[in-house]
Each structure stands twice: as C-alpha cells, then as structure tokens.
Image (cartoon, rainbow, N blue to C red):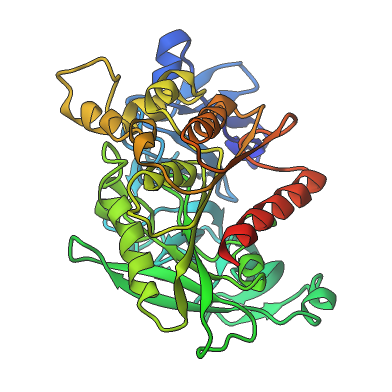
C-alpha cells in the first residue's frame, strides 16, 4: 500500500488457506485525500474476499495471525485522513466474529505485534516518555504490562523458547540483538557487532532534562554533552528540531542525524520532545495539527532558553538544525528567533506552505495537518496554518543558513529548499545550497551521507567556532 509498508501488510493463515492483506481500494481524489485502508481476507480455495474492517475509517494495517489461526491482530487508526492518529491494537476472533480494541484505555500506540505460542499473550512495542519499550497484552483480562526498562528503543519482540528476541538501540549505541526475560525484563546482549569500534570511542553523556513550557507543561528534553565535558568551559550549543512532525525524539540511532556525532564535534545538543510528538498522551500529540507555528515553536525556544542559562553554554554561539518538519521549524525560527542563533541548517524543510499543500505526494497529510486548503477563507484553522508559512517572514531573516534537499524528494519538493536559499541570498544573507540529485526525503547512500556530514559540520564550525 503506497507510499508506506511492505511484507508486514500481508499474512498467511497458519493452515495456508487464507491470505490477510492490507489495501486501500480507492482511486483518484478519494485515494489522495483518504487514509481509509482495510484488512481483507482472501480465501484461496474459492477466490472469495471479505473486508474484515468494513466501516472502520482510518488506517487498518499489518495483520498478524495467532498460531492456531483463530485470532487476527492488527493496527488500526480511527479517523480518515489522519496518518498520525493513535495506532490501536485490534484483535478479531474468527470463532465469535467479535473484534475488540485492547488499547482503548491505554494512552499509547501499539506497533510490531507478535503472538505468544499459546495465544494467551501478545507482545508489542510502544513509545512513552521518549523511550520505546516492549509490552505484553494478556488476552484473558486485557491487562497491559511493560516488560523492558531503561534508556532504549526496541524495534520488535519475537517470542522464542520462553523468551523474547529483540533489536535494541539508544542515543549512544546502534542496533544489537538482545534476549529478554518475559517475566522480569532482564536482558542479555547476544551480539557485539560494534564493540570493536565503540571500545575505541569516548561517548557523550546523555541527560534527561524537564523544561517548563509557556503553557505550564513539563517537556522532556535530551541534552547531549561533548565527550570529556568540562563544566568550567563554555560550549557552542545546537537546538535540534524533530521532523515527522509526529515522530518522537526517542532513543534513536541514525548515521545522519546522530546526536552523539554532533556532541563529538564539541557541541552541546538540546533535543526537546515538543508538543506534537507521541509518547506523552494523545492530547500532547494532537496539539500540532493546525498549529504549526504555535505552541511547538514556543517549546523549542523554551528548551534552548532554559539550557542557555547554564554557565557552560555560550549563548553567543547557538545553532539550530532540523529536517522535514524540523526543516520547517528552522525556516520559521529564522524569522522569529530574535537573534538567538548564529547559524541555521534545514534539510528537506517546508518553506512555503501553499506550495507544500498542493505539491506533496501525501495530500491527505497536508489536508489534515494544515486544516484544509489555503483558499478557504472561512476555515479559521487553515488560515492560521498558512499565515505561519515561513516564507512570509523572510523580511526578518538575518542569520546564515544552509539548505539541503534531495531532488527525488516527493514528500517535500526540492523547490522548497531552493526557494529558501534564493530568498536568503536576495536578502544579502550568507547561504549555501546542497542538492543531492539521487536522494529522496532522506540521504540513504553512504557516500552521500559522508558529504552531508562534512557539509553540515563545516557550516556549523564556520559560524559557531
């Protein structure tokens, strides 16, 4: 089901007689504006097909048969057009014909579903407070229990011989395979593929810091300090703006946006879990839709202002970086930062929301998150969204900016980055444009990633060191 998904969107029944698959059977404008996919059951013997989720209006995806074939678990969103709605854990009982939402009273999402061999439990991963852990659902009473603990992200959980096998990473370590004791959550690391590298490195310290926001909420913010950090010295500091816009700043590991690598260059990194990110309840998550230039932007400034009060932060050497919605944030903050920052970097960022509304391959996303089309003057939410388009504030830009984009990016077209670059140059601001002809919304090729990193740090070093 384009543009997302793969083999996880279909499943064979254990007896090999039925295929459960995900499909969005729409065409034209309906396909462009809707996220209403369904789970279908195709019977091989007679070619019949049943819509298991008929009348369920959001994303219904990733069916998983229980070992006996009696149950089908799957992920389900409630609202049509909202791709960041809560992913509910639904289970269909083929014997009774009943379906139940087991996460109705669980203010978190459920992903990467896996059955126990006896069908009494189902395991899944869920993000809470910027960490993604493994949970167990007991079918008999519907209770959900967190199994793992610690500053980690788990990608999956596969039952095996009375335990769980999972991949685990953190802000300080890439993926390794671990064995998890289901009863007490104890973990045994089974692979050490990266030990020969990490044994030679001095890693940055990662600190959890809670920042008070302007709407009187507490916001979890990761602060990453350079290796061999000396609190008597002053350090240049970066504000990291997350994309998504509904993607958590969790214990992620990336060879591009790597907070350890940024800290290793001598920068303190401030990475806030602003409004609009999952893992802090649905109300916190949904604030951002229709309010791109609102509370979440005030959250960014609250985070950098809070950390900048520390004696070891050089408030005269602050930078701001981000990709996708994080790139939008960079462009927006460039017109609102009131001289806080000395350098900006935006990767695949949205510069002009009116362009973005009609250009993206995910039209349903722009339509929901921006509130509707920009020409609907009676739509107050849409008008508020488009009034916060970064291009409207270029007259306030005064800070050097690096714009990066991939020419195969159909999520946010490269014309957005080019427009931002041209606007800065016309304003007389030092600006640089890096375009990758063979990359999309992400920089995926290793050679390109090296160029990306070299350009990224050369720009920061030029203005912050």
Q: Position of residue 190 (x, y in %)?
A: 75, 75
Residue depicted at x 49% and y 51%: 111
Q: Compared to 374, does 455 lie above or below?
A: below
Is 310 positioned to the left or the right of 50 in the image?
left
Along the line of sight, which residue is nearer the eye, 88 or 198? 198
Is 153 positioned to the left or the right of 53 in the image?
right
Q: Position of residue 154 (x, y in %)?
A: 57, 64
Residue depicted at x 28% and y 23%: 372
Residue depicted at x 25% and y 51%: 295
Residue at the extreme front of the image, as rendered: 428
Q: Position of residue 105 (x, y in %)?
A: 26, 57
Along the line of sight, which residue is nearer the eye, 122 or 18? 122
**Image quadrant for the N terminus?**
top right
Along the line of sight, which residue is nearer the eye, 107 or 200? 200
Image quadrant where residue 291 sits: top left
Q: Compared to 367, does 186 lie above or below?
A: below
Residue depicted at x 39% and y 73%: 308
Q: Position of residue 357 (x, y in %)?
A: 40, 23
């Amino acid at each position: 089901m384009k543009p997302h998904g793969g083999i996880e969107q279909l499943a064979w029944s254990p007896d090999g007689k039925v295929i459960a698959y995900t499909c969005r059977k729409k065409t034209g404008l309906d396909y462009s504006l809707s996220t209403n996919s369904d789970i279908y059951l195709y019977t091989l013997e007679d070619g019949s097909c049943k819509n298991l989720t008929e009348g369920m209006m959001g994303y219904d995806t990733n069916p998983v048969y229980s070992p006996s074939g009696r149950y089908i678990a799957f992920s389900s969103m409630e609202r049509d057009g909202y791709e960041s709605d809560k992913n509910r854990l639904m289970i269909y009982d083929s014997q009774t014909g009943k379906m139940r939402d087991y996460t109705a009273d669980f203010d978190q999402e459920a992903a990467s579903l896996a059955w126990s061999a006896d069908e009494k439990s189902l395991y899944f991963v869920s993000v809470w407070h910027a960490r993604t852990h493994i949970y167990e659902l007991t079918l008999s009473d519907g209770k959900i229990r967190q199994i793992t603990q610690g500053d980690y992200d788990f990608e999956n959980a596969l039952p095996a011989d009375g335990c769980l096998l999972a991949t685990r990473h953190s802000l300080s370590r890439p993926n390794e395979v671990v064995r998890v004791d289901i009863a007490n959550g104890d973990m045994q690391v089974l692979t050490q593929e990266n030990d020969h590298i990490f044994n030679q490195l001095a890693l940055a310290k990662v600190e959890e810091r809670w920042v008070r926001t302007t709407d009187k909420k507490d916001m979890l913010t990761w602060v990453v300090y350079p290796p061999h950090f000396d609190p008597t010295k002053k350090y240049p500091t970066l504000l990291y703006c997350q994309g998504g816009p509904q993607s958590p700043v969790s214990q992620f590991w990336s060879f591009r946006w790597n907070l350890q690598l940024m800290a290793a260059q001598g920068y303190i990194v401030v990475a806030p879990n602003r409004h609009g990110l999952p893992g802090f309840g649905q109300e916190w998550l949904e604030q951002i839709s229709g309010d791109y230039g609102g509370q979440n932007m005030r959250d960014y400034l609250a985070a950098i202002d809070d950390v900048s009060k520390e004696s070891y932060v050089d408030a005269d050497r602050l930078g701001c970086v981000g990709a996708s919605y994080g790139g939008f944030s960079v462009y927006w903050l460039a017109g609102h930062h009131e001289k806080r920052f000395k350098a900006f970097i935006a990767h695949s960022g949205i510069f002009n929301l009116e362009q973005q509304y009609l250009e993206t391959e995910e039209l349903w996303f722009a339509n929901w998150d921006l509130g509707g089309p920009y020409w609907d003057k009676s739509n107050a939410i849409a008008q508020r969204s488009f009034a916060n388009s970064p291009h409207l504030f270029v007259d306030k830009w005064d800070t050097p900016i690096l714009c990066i984009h991939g020419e195969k990016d159909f999520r946010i077209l490269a014309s957005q980055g080019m427009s931002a670059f041209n606007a800065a140059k016309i304003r007389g601001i030092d600006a640089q444009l890096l375009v990758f002809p063979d990359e999309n919304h992400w920089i995926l090729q290793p050679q390109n990633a090296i160029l990306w990193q070299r350009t990224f740090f050369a720009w920061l070093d030029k203005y912050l060191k």
